[in-house]
Image (cartoon, rainbow, N blue to C red):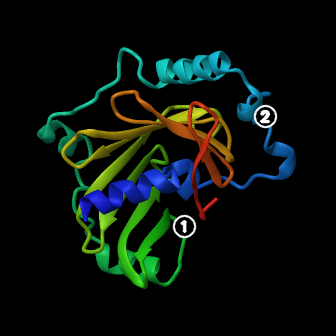
């Protein structure tokens, strides 16, 4: 199940900017001149330079690749077990995505709810991912400038180990990295491209 969820998150670009995206209009797609997608027209040197630049931003000297388990659980004390799992499960299964206190996203395998994510409005830079019985599985930790673009997000397992990192240029464009800094690809709308500008994946949740 864990391997399935990790792959599921990677394919969908599953992070706050995707699950809990801010409303944007067509006029707002280009932000600060950096959301224009010309990946296919760039030279390899230009693409490699961008990949390295965003990698340097995400994986700076303060990056923690593996928290101690006790330290990580202390950081998220009170959220390791969803005490309101019964309510959240019903809301997620019934398609409720927002309440006055939090935003909610559900994930299904067929018709079966396998996990859900919660972003509390009093702490929007953290997203908690639970399995269907309310056990914490993953945590997204988001940079300070969220929800303003650009920003980055790092996802950790409940044991404190980093799973992935994403640099969000806009609602439509995200650069995906492995926890070791290896570039996975860049999403633009519903398509992912590798460093050589070859399309590798598509997604349906954009």
Query: Horizontal placement of 27 versus 44: left or right?
Result: right
Residue at horizontal 87 percent and vertical 46 percent from the top: 27
Residue on which the image places disc 1: 100
In percent of the image, x 48 and y 66: which residue is there? 104
Residue 197 placement (x, y as % from top left)? 64, 35
> What element does badge 2 sit on?
loop
Q: Residue at x 58, y 20 (%)?
A: 48
Judging depth in this view, the residue of 188 and 26 nearest the camera is 188
The one nearer the camera, 117 or 174, is: 174
* Residue count near mark 1 (Cα–Cα under 10 Å), binned few <14, some 14–19, many ≥20: few
From the viewer's perspective, is the residue at label 1 or at label 2 nearer?
2
Task: Give residue 206's position: percent from left, percent from top.
Answer: 64, 59
Residue positioned most to the left: 70
Indicate the secondary structure of the residue bearing disc 1.
loop
Taking 135 as reference, is 86 above or below it?
below
Question: Along the horizontal axis of the image, is 169 left or right of 139?
Answer: right
Above-or-below relation of 182 to 44: below
Give coordinates of residue 117: x percent, y percent: 41, 62
For the N terminus, the quadrant is bottom left
Task: State the image quarter where residue 45 is shown.
Answer: top right
Q: Which mark is residue 36?
A: 2
> Relative to 111, is 122 above or below?
above
Instruction: Classify residue 21 as left or right of residue 76.
Output: right
Q: Label 1 to label 2, Cα distance in Å?
A: 35 Å
Q: Are marks 1 and 2 in contact (CB under 8 Å)?
A: no
Q: As drawn, is 121 to the left or to the right of 109? A: right
Q: Name the residue: 46% across, 56% down.
A: 119
Q: How many marks?
A: 2
Mark sitting earlier along the chain (1/2): 2
Q: Position of residue 130 (x, y in %)?
A: 31, 63
Q: Quadrant of residue 132?
A: bottom left
């Amino acid at each position: 199940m864990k391997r399935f969820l990790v792959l599921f998150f990677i394919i969908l670009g599953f992070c706050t900017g995707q699950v809990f995206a801010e409303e944007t209009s067509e006029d707002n797609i280009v932000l600060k001149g950096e959301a224009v997608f010309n990946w296919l027209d760039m030279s390899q040197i230009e693409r490699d330079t961008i990949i390295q630049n965003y990698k340097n931003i995400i994986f700076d000297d303060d990056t923690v690749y593996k928290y101690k388990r006790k330290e990580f659980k202390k950081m998220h004390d009170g959220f390791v077990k969803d005490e309101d799992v019964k309510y959240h499960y019903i809301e997620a299964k019934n398609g409720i995505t927002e309440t006055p206190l939090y935003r909610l996203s559900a994930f299904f395998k067929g018709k079966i709810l396998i996990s859900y994510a919660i972003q509390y409005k009093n702490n929007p830079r953290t997203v908690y991912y639970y399995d269907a019985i309310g056990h914490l599985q993953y945590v997204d930790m988001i940079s300070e400038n969220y929800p303003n673009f650009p920003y980055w997000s790092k996802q950790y397992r409940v044991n404190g180990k980093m799973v992935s990192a994403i640099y969000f240029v806009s609602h439509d464009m995200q650069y995906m990295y492995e926890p070791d800094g290896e570039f996975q690809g860049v999403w633009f709308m519903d398509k992912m491209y590798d460093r050589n500008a070859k399309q590798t994946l598509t997604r349906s949740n954009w």
